Image (cartoon, coloured by chain):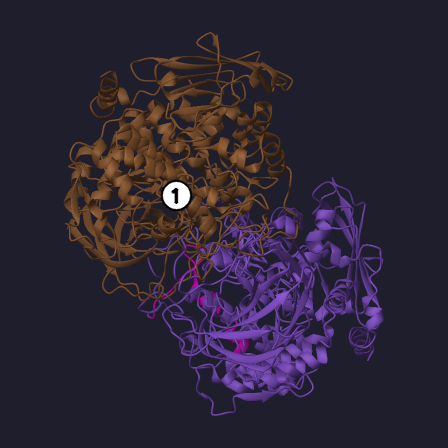
Chain colours: A brown, B purple
Amino acid sequence: MKTRCVYFFVLLSLYACKKETQYVPNTKMLVDYVNPFIGTDGPGNTYPGATVPFGMVQLSPDIGIPGWDRIAGYYYQDSIITGFSHTHLTGTGAGDLYDILVMPINSRSNKRIEENNFKPFSSFNHKQEEASPGYYTVDLLDYGIKAELTATARVGIHRYTFPKDKDTEIHVDLGYTINWDKPTAIHIEKVNDSTIQGYRMSTGWARNQKVYFQMQFSKPFSSYGYYEEKAINVNPIKGNTRVVLKYDVEAGDKIVVKTGLSTTSCKAAAHAIKIEAMGFDFDAHRDKARLTWEKELQKIKITSSDKDKKSVFYTMLYQSMLAPTLLSDIDGSYKAANDEYGLYKTGKDSLAKANGFNRYDTFSLWDTFRAAHPLYTITQPERVSDMIKSLLAHYKETDELPVWSLQGSETNMMIGYHAVPVIVDAYFKGFDFDSELAYKACKESAMIQDRQVDIYMEKGYVPVDDQHENWSVSKTLEYAYDDWCIAMFAKDLGKHDDYEYFLKRSENWANLYNEKTTWIQPKDTKGTFVKPFIPKQYTPYFCESNAWQYYWFVPHNIDALIDKTGGKERFEQKLDSMFSYYPGPEDKLPLFSTGMIGQYAHGNEPSHHVAYLYNYLNNPSKTQKLIRQILENQYKNKPNGHCGNEDCGQMSSWYIFSSLGFYPVNPAQGIYHIGIPLFEEAIIQVPNGKTFKVIASNFSKENNYVKQVFLNGKPLQRIYIAHKEIVNGGVLEFVMTNTANNNDFKKLETPNPNKVY
Amino acid sequence: MKTRCVYFFVLLSLYACKKETQYVPNTKMLVDYVNPFIGTDGPGNTYPGATVPFGMVQLSPDIGIPGWDRIAGYYYQDSIITGFSHTHLTGTGAGDLYDILVMPINSRSNKRIEENNFKPFSSFNHKQEEASPGYYTVDLLDYGIKAELTATARVGIHRYTFPKDKDTEIHVDLGYTINWDKPTAIHIEKVNDSTIQGYRMSTGWARNQKVYFQMQFSKPFSSYGYYEEKAINVNPIKGNTRVVLKYDVEAGDKIVVKTGLSTTSCKAAAHAIKIEAMGFDFDAHRDKARLTWEKELQKIKITSSDKDKKSVFYTMLYQSMLAPTLLSDIDGSYKAANDEYGLYKTGKDSLAKANGFNRYDTFSLWDTFRAAHPLYTITQPERVSDMIKSLLAHYKETDELPVWSLQGSETNMMIGYHAVPVIVDAYFKGFDFDSELAYKACKESAMIQDRQVDIYMEKGYVPVDDQHENWSVSKTLEYAYDDWCIAMFAKDLGKHDDYEYFLKRSENWANLYNEKTTWIQPKDTKGTFVKPFIPKQYTPYFCESNAWQYYWFVPHNIDALIDKTGGKERFEQKLDSMFSYYPGPEDKLPLFSTGMIGQYAHGNEPSHHVAYLYNYLNNPSKTQKLIRQILENQYKNKPNGHCGNEDCGQMSSWYIFSSLGFYPVNPAQGIYHIGIPLFEEAIIQVPNGKTFKVIASNFSKENNYVKQVFLNGKPLQRIYIAHKEIVNGGVLEFVMTNTANNNDFKKLETPNPNKVY
């Protein structure tokens, strides 16, 4: 009940009390610590633009150059901006979205060279550029135009400040296309002299994307013209793809542009503007976005004298809330996930309506089931149910749970059925949704005749197929983990047969264990291990990884993996090697293997739980040393501050958990493994007005190990804490010391693999 | 005779004595002072790549983004390279050339996103990039490939050093197109497993460009494939436009690629490789290029303790030798200038042969007639005749002298018939060419029924036409100046009637002088001054300029301009205002108005002689102050070191002359106005083994004025020195002082406007 009250208070403060929302206190706010440029250089693939938590709109600058480095539109090393589009992916390797590009220009644009098919762009400079949560600004140097961006959940708001120029133009380019994104149908129409609307259908990584928009301008355009692109890459679109709105402006004139989005209709897009973005007071909307973010960031208050670390922490907390993204209109309507092939595959309507919840999408589940979704169960209690309901809506629309869904479309990127751990985790943590439906969805997704689940069920492992390109080992391990989650879910629902069946399936990882080599290896259909096998090699059997990195993926039964490996001593030797056996110069690392510590690749998700495994060996000091090393070396307060793709909140959520001192090794078991806190104190806001406080006593630069852990004043007898213990409020105290201390930990209980806590 | 000997010595040292040319002394060479990155940031529009003096090949990196900033292919602020093409313009505003793009890639190229129409590129970093005369290297970071470039006159030589990768490819892309450049016909064929050849015909700023090539590889490719671009902007080319050569390489493997160019045939391109670029010893060719440059730079030896100034000086000397560029094959053949419309406009052959001279092109005459060509009469005695013969060849091919010709094509960019002052200057300085033919060419170019020369002859000025877009004032002034040159030429050839006629025409500038306003203003066909008229405004009557900047363009008769203005006192007031009346924030300056000192725009050519005009007022201290200011503030040893377009050697030649202490205000009068030297000593190599030494005695940081000037030990009685005095050898001594000193100069003689010295 209290949660709801807080929620209403937020709503009130955001939408009702305009005067109050414009009040920005003089003291430094937590949003001021956020550096949205972290990850915009290097492999992070983040964007610096304006958005609100889990918003539909990500209004951000686009460089206009294709390829991996600029996959989120922007790259810190560049010097030009080609416009501001309204949708971007955060931290992924998927070159998609970039819908509805807006670019203001004027007659100062004399650096351009007239071509048949002129696409405007401008130089820019980081000195005349700023970003903070919900706000981005840059000077378009070629034109002398200042651009500012902010957003509501469904509306992107631009403000352009112009120099005097009677030949000022605002280009709205729906034909802008880059990477995988290709428009398939475009419509633009003038509603009145300060409003346009239309749609942009496109295909790319996600098929059959639909973006309807309405765009309102604070100043009527004096005239306008449509342009037809003569060549949009190789897929020519017939008809107009760009509208150019003309203005005669005086020096200092400002034009505010509001773009409402919807996946269902222009009307819904207009409705979004009406409800979320009244008037043309840009500053008020910017302040609203800022306060929305501040509210979110206040959920975890840390004490630290290190400004850079504080910036990294709050930026990671910020980046953990950029996905999933809102899919539904204000009235709940959204483009359903069943027409991703442009056909109604399931025979159901292509439009759906979320009743009583917000429908989300952009589920990068292979990444986010590990730490991001568990984090939301602590920091986003009001959104977890909606996210689960969204996963279930996807199931209802397509008869399968999503794997990697975007814009109401299953992209089928990556592997596993990792909606399952997300749902099961939320189920055990008591979030509200239809558990029978959820169970049905989980079970069916684990029984499909697709993604080699069928042959996995038949053989107990995914065999290498003819093309050897099937990530067979990774699939086997991940399916087995997800099966464990279903088993626990079935058990709790009293479905005993299913429990037995899926618990048995959850042991399938062992079918690929080669006793002779002590590695988990690919097998062919006949059950023979594939040769040659070199553990450090990146082969098609391991998803973006090698055999070292996947060896540890039995998060539901590390005890059994230890046994298989030959006991704790042998397991610890192997784990030590994981962190000390560095790739040589002759080893060609794939794009994803970054943030290396030996074979450990913090830049990619399969490694994320591995540093915590020393806890199972009663040797947590090694975990502590590694976690500190990763926290301090792989996350920096600079544009090149991410060691790998941010991946829709997973890299940042790893940081949040680990810097707080605990981490969900098995993300559906209701517990978090004890690590080492990075800050003197952290106060987490939990439901019912309570707090969960993490204290590091004897905190100092030298004291880099944990001596003992107390929960609510009593020595912790376990190497983990339960989720319930956090959300009920309390104090977790880490007594810090300067030497590795395993003696006190030796007696600590490790989790029971056959139980959710 | 001696000149020829020197020339032969150079040839010998370059082509015969391989061992000797590889000898690079340990002491710092002058090439080491050159920073080819000057002008690659900001408005300079230079390229950093590899070329030899006045060479046909400019092998340089291409960013792949269109527009003004990257018009020479490269821009220092960028972070990607899309390949290395073989032809680039230096310091212009013309987006053309970029022929035959080469890009090596390999399977590490995982930052790319597979698109239908993949164009490879790589990130790069200035830390792993270097440039020096004749050499450029950069690491292509996405692929781990080191690229190195060097050149001979007609051959671009690449060396790529690879990491181990069996999927290495060299892309040769003839479809690469950007800015105005558009391919019209492309052919690629395999000659053998280490040779390809073909051609790339294109149109753009220059029409009907023909580039034939042969490309030889030090390592045979294992296989190859042709690619047809599905969309080359809006002008689809049918057939293959790209060949991809495949290699399996080991770590450290190097492949050398030699690309011969010709405007006439693949055979000629192959011949260029055979004669100029024997073998595959990249280092030897790089050293040859380096020594070729060193030889050129040794022509002026300066003494300075300021390393940055020394770098600027030698970079400017280097940049003064990047155009004109060689057009003819080794046997003298070249694509004639008469088929620039793809038709044989003149009914003559499209192929021509230069007998006994090298045919040059890339004549940016509106820029270079001012200081670059006069500089060549001192530093390039062996090339001046060839350049004049090239201008005359263009005349023979098209019946007109060139205005701005490129790749054997008249682009008709800019105004004037400024081949005339270049020819007349060379004539009076005694260079060898057919003077009767030259005179005919000059006269006919001044009598054409085109470029409003006809109406200029009829009315005595160029009237504003209906569109008011005709640069009427600029044309009138520039035609009048060129007419003065013809008059002097006629007089010397004994053509008295012509002398009278053209001398009269040379006074036409006065027809636009408005006595009421004391400005030179546009007139309509009826002879009425056009209203409104605001001198500081940039209007279509003034070429890239305003009335302030063009007021001073009567270089042949400054005395008359002073009289018109109302005498020396009034003239000096106006000149003072020129340098003190700064544009306000409300004034929209065009792209070309940069390097502003008041209304003076050092970034564009019409201003270039203006700071020297105080010499006519016996007030040279003001000239001295301004020249020092421009030399020190508008040229910097950094990428953004040019204040405006370098313009094919004009900005750099201004620097060379001015820093030596003299400048050709009227570039065809055989004299140089006295300025102020920037260095303690400069030794100019002049013919017959002699030197012309410029000494600044009492040189110090504080002594920023000239007290007195001595020529060969005697006080100079004139405010100018004659060209003959330089090339005969001698010593010009400037006695420096810390205060403005005009008294000693008051008596000095100014030049006689009716005479060439």
On screen, residue B284 versus residue A211, left or right, reads right
Q: Quadrant of the C terminus of chain A?
A: top left
- Disc 1 target residue: A479
Q: Toward which corner of the image does residue B481 lie, by quadrant?
A: bottom right
Residue at 49%, 35% (x, y): give it.
Answer: A608
Give B661 or A262, whichever is nearer the viewer.
A262
Q: Look at label 1 and name its amino acid.
A: Tyr
Count up the numbered dots: 1
Residue at 25%, 32% (x, y): give it.
Answer: A386
Chain ID for label 1?
A
Residue A440: x %, y % from top left: 24, 39
> Looking at the picture, does residue A407 appear above or below residue A115?
above
Which stretch appears magenta?
A: B502-525
Find out whether residue B428 is within the magenta segment. no
Q: Secondary structure at mark 1?
A: helix
Would you say residue B551 is visible in this rendering? no
On screen, residue A259 versus residue B348, left or right, reads left
Find out whether residue B510 is within the magenta segment. yes
